[in-house]
Image (tube, rainbow, N blue to C red):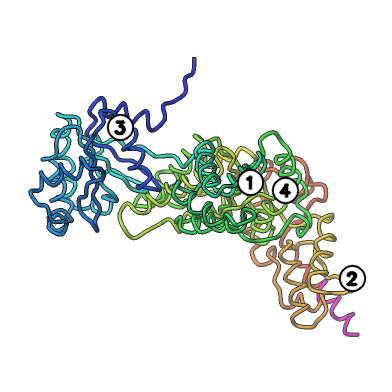
Amino acid sequence: MSTTPPTLVQRWQIARKRSVPLLAIETPDPGATIDWIQVASPNQPTPLVRWDAAQGLQGVNRLGTRCLTEAAGVTDDLQLLQATVDPVNALRLMHRLPEHTIACVLNLHRYLQQADVVQAVWNCRDVFKRNFRTLVLLSPSFEAPLELVHDILIWAEPYPTDEEMLRITRRLYEAAQRALPEAEGLRRIFDALRGLPAFSIEQALALSLTARDLDFEQLWQQKVQFIRSTHGLSFSTGRETFADIGGLDQAKRALALRFQGPQPPKVIVRIEEIDRATAGASKGGGTDSSGVAQDAMQVLLTALEDEGWDGMLCLGPAGTGKTYFSKAVGPTFGCPTLTADLGATRSKYVGDSEANVRGMVRAIKAIAGADAFFIASVNSVETMDPALIRRFRAGRWFFDLCTPEERPPIWKIQRARYRIPEDEPLPPDERFTGADIRNVCEQAHKLGVTLIQATEYTVPVALADPDGMRRLQEAAHLRFLSASYPGPYQKPGPAAQGRGLQLGDPGLMADLLEMRKREES
């Protein structure tokens, strides 16, 4: 029989009753965490103090202030600051605080590369254990140093739930003497606020409540700023839709069915060139001696599995529409789109890279819950870990050269985009990608030449790297789904029944030269 897991508050109360001495809580809002710790702690009244690098030790409640003053032997605030702004001195002073004291320490992870700070934390363990004191380390992310791995519990505080957002919203609406919105209005509010810390939710709502209505644009701006502050995560602002993309009908159809299903995605998460982002962490342990790439991939693997996230893995040569497709999904179905850049989570400081990638995953979870849908582009599957490939349960898709059926609609879209007459002759395009067609139209427009003449200033992908194209096609043959037609992808050749042509045929340039001669004559 399954049971509901205890909330963080319940776990905290159990830890206090059993005299757990060392805790680390990953929280986006330390102030709000200290507030609920104060309210939720048993054995009230409890001395509560806090430390940060700017203000040293301070009392949070009256009992905490009195006990701190007695332990330090000073009454002047400046003297107390000078005596406790150093983290080691502050941790030593905490030994003198009475039983049941809670000492909250903010952002100590910045000092955990120092041996004396790590030792000072460890020294609190047995002293605090004896009389129900608790040292609580609060930070956005926490990676325990080796010396504390077996001595400190690490918890992650979730972002506010819909119920908590409802309480905050109701309180602000009552303060503004406004009627609470109906269910649909509340849903829109929660969609805009989901993923923000409690304090930011309150501030965003307060700033967005106008005299007549709620300014949703202002509300979403708070979400955008929050995402921008998360390392490696950004909002995609493109407006392209599937109507701007010719071809790729099978991949489009799969996404349409997904959004029509019983659990449509709440957020699209794009990852560009995921094979490069996780390079060094793949087969055989990888080549990244720092361990950052291995850690990032393990965090991503765990999140995809534990949260039930899935998505599409898109393989193909440059210019075949992988990026354009992933950008167009959100605007097509009215779904927010995030871009996750694993490379941007890396830092020169020890531990910060690991913290950043975990913060990125927590933010995605807070915004989307179990309904994040990942679309990852990949240029090669040879360096990717098979475990990561398996996580993309919505299919591995191959984006190839345009099929004969796809080229006309792409030409139509790009002609209209660059104001090229519909009756202008087309160059030979059997080996063109969608990007090749766009490039030819763009050059024709900017240079003031015909489409056939513009081919002199572009090199199709299939001609620029025929060997690379062939390797990708062979890797995808019958192993990937085709983005263009139903069923598994089939590489060009007799068995493909005309869906593609063999590469490396020198006839293309001869055809172009012949057409150019006819134009000039």
* Vertical placement of residue 370 versus 109, above or below: above
**Which residue matches tag 2?**
422
Q: Amino acid at mark 4?
A: Ala
Place residue 78 in its image quadrant. Answer: bottom left
Q: How far across and how far down the image is residue 61, in percent?
A: 25, 43
Q: Amino acid at mark 1?
A: Arg
Residue at (84% x, 54% y) in the render: 405
**Which residue matches tag 4?**
483
Which of the two labelled residues, at mark 4 and mark 2, occupies the earlier sequence position?
2
Which of the two labelled residues, at mark 1 and mark 3, occupies the earlier sequence position?
3
**Which residue matches tag 1?**
188
> What span is colored magenta in the figure?
511-521
Helix or strand or loop: what does disc 3 sit on? loop
Q: Main secondary structure of the magenta part?
A: helix
Q: Would you call the spot at circle 4 few (<14 residues within 10 Å), some (14-19), or many (20 or more)?
A: many
Which of the two labelled residues, at mark 4 and mark 3, occupies the earlier sequence position?
3
Foreground mark, 4 or 3, reads 3
Helix or strand or loop: what does disc 1 sit on? helix
Q: How far across and how far down the image is residue 341, in percent?
A: 50, 56
Which of the two labelled residues, at mark 2 and mark 3, occupies the earlier sequence position?
3
**Which residue matches tag 3?**
41
Q: Does the image show residue 150?
A: yes
Question: Do the CB atoms of the residues marked 2 and 3 lie less than 8 Å apart?
Answer: no
Foreground mark, 4 or 2, reads 2
Mark 1 to mark 2 CA distance (whole Å): 44 Å
